[in-house]
């Protein structure tokens, strides 16, 4: 392989690596935003029939996030594995906000993720 081909190959590999780092950083920023969103909510997080405030919900979701870290590649994976339903009972988590219909936590967090992404694009 000529030196030029080696340099071009190295540049392509480095570009791919840097792109991957940017994707990882963007995903982590989205997950951090969702964690903050849960922590600061005035809504109640229903899990297996019991209700939790944002701070308590954050603790539970953070534990699941750590447990499933190797399976989480995207923000959607984070929601799926950490904040959608009980792995033990199979029951979905629900969000109860004042004057709003009850929604599945998955839908609530996906809507917030979309809002975050739209806001990020505008900036």
Image: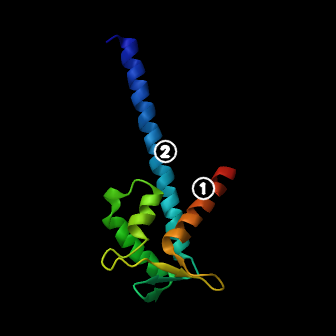
Query: How far separated are the C-alphas under marks 1 and 2?
Result: 15 Å
In the image, residue 74 lies at what x, y percent? Answer: 44, 54
Displayed quadrant of residue 14: top left
Work out whether 51 lies above or below 6: below
Residue extending furthest toward the top:
2
The picture places residue 100, in percent across and down from the top left corner, at 64, 82
Which mark is drawn over residue 22?
Answer: 2
Label 1 element class: helix
Question: What is the quadrant of residue 3 in the picture?
Answer: top left
Mark 1 or mark 2, which is nearer to you? 1
Asked if residue 87 is positioned above or below residue 16 in the image, the reply reads below
The residue at the point 38 percent across, 15 percent down is 5
Residue under pointer 1: 117
Any part of residue 123 in sight: no
Residue 91's x, y, as percent? Answer: 39, 79
- Image quarter in which the N terminus is found: top left
- How packed mark 1 is, by other alpha carbons closer than 10 Å (few <14, some 14-19, many 20 or more), is few
Relative vertical location of residue 17 with respect to residue 75 in this rendering, above or below: above
Q: Which residue is found at the position 51% from the left and 51% from the top?
A: 26
Q: Which residue does the image show at 42% across and 88% down from the upper left?
A: 49
Q: Where is residue 122 in the image (x, y as percent from the top left)?
A: 69, 51
Tag count: 2
Q: Which residue is drawn at 56% across and 62% down?
A: 113
């Amino acid at each position: 392989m000529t030196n030029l081909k080696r340099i071009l190959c190295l540049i392509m590999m480095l570009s791919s690596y840097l792109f991957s780092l940017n994707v990882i950083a963007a995903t982590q920023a989205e997950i951090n935003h969702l964690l903050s969103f849960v922590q600061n909510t005035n809504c109640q997080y229903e899990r297996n029939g019991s209700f939790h405030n944002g701070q308590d919900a954050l603790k539970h979701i953070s534990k699941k996030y750590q447990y499933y870290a190797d399976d989480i590649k995207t923000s959607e994976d984070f929601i799926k594995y950490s904040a959608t339903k009980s792995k033990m009972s199979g029951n979905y988590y629900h969000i109860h906000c004042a004057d709003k219909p009850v929604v599945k936590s998955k839908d609530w967090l996906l809507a917030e993720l979309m809002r975050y992404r739209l806001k990020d694009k505008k900036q």
